Image (cartoon, rainbow, N blue to C red):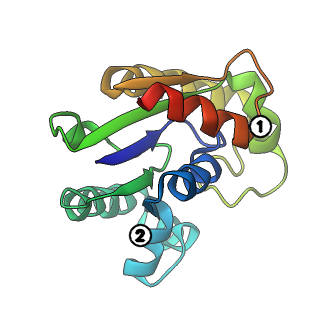
Amino acid sequence: MNIVLTGFMGTGKSTIGRLLAEKLGLGFIDTDEYIEENAGKSIQDIFASEGEKAFRAYEYETAQDLRFADGMVIAAGGGFNAAPFKKDEHFKIVYIKRSIDSILPKLTAAQTGRPNADGKTGAELKELFYARVPVYEENADITLDLTNSETSPEDACKILISLLK
C-alpha cells in the first residue's frame, strides 16, 4: 500500500510523511524533492526559467512514475494532482486539513522558498487555498483534520495511523 499526503502549502505533509514512513516501515518520497532531483534544478529555478505550467508537467510525470510505487508514503506538493491515484486500490489519499489562518503566517514571512507563496499577499494565498480545498476533499480517502488544534507532527502521525487502520 502507498499513502499520498495532500493539502495546502505549509500543512506539514513532508514532516508528517517522514514520521509516518518511519513508524510504518515504509519508504518516503517528497514530490518536490523528486522533481528537483530529476530536473536537476530547484523548484524555484523551474518556476523562474520554465514557468508554472512546466512545473505542473513535471508533477504529472512524477505522478506517472509513482503509479508503480509500493510501500511508500508520498508527500505531494500543494498543487499536485492526486486524482490519478484515486482509482487505484494500492493508494490511500490523505488530505491534511488545516485552517488558512494557522498556516498563513509562515507562508507570508519573508522568502519561504515556495514559488506560489513568495511575494503573494495574504489575500492572494487565501484565494489559492480556497480554490484548492475542493480538489483535496474530492480526492481524499481520509481527512486528517487539524483545523482546530495545535497538534504536533508526532501526534498528527499517531492520529493518522489510527485513521489508516
Residue 152 is labelled as 1
Occupied quadrant, residue 144 = top right
* In this rendering, position of residue 90 left or right of residue 154: left
Relative vertical location of residue 41 with respect to residue 20 in this rendering, above or below: below
| Residue at the disc numbered 2 | 35
The image quadrant where one finds the C terminus is top left
Q: Please report the residue visible at 16 percent of the width from the left and 40 percent of the height from the top.
A: 88
Give residue 134's quadrant in the image: top left
Query: At numbered mark 2, what does the secondary structure look like: helix, strand or loop?
Result: helix
Q: How many marks?
A: 2
Q: Residues within 10 Å of mark 1 (few under 14, many from 20)?
A: few
Q: Is residue 32 left or right of residue 140?
A: right
Above or below residue 49? Residue 11 is above
- Horizontal and vertical percent position of residue 110: 84, 53
Q: Residue at x 61, y 46 (%)?
A: 16
Residue 11: x and y in percent read: 64, 38
- Per the rendering, the mark at residue 24 is none
In-front residue for pair 21/107: 21
Give me the residue at 71% from left, 42% from top.
Answer: 153
Q: Amino acid at mark 2?
A: Ile
Q: Secondary structure at mark 1?
A: loop
Left or right, 115 with reference to 100: left
Identify the residue shown where x is 15% and y is 34%.
87
Dot 1 or dot 2: first in sequence order is 2
Residue 5 in percent (x, y) is at 46, 42
Residue at the extreme bottom? 40
Check disc 1 and give the amino acid type: Ser
Q: Quick one: 84 or 40, which is closer to the camera?
A: 84
Image-based side of 36 in relation to 71, left or right: right
Front: mark 1 or 2: 1
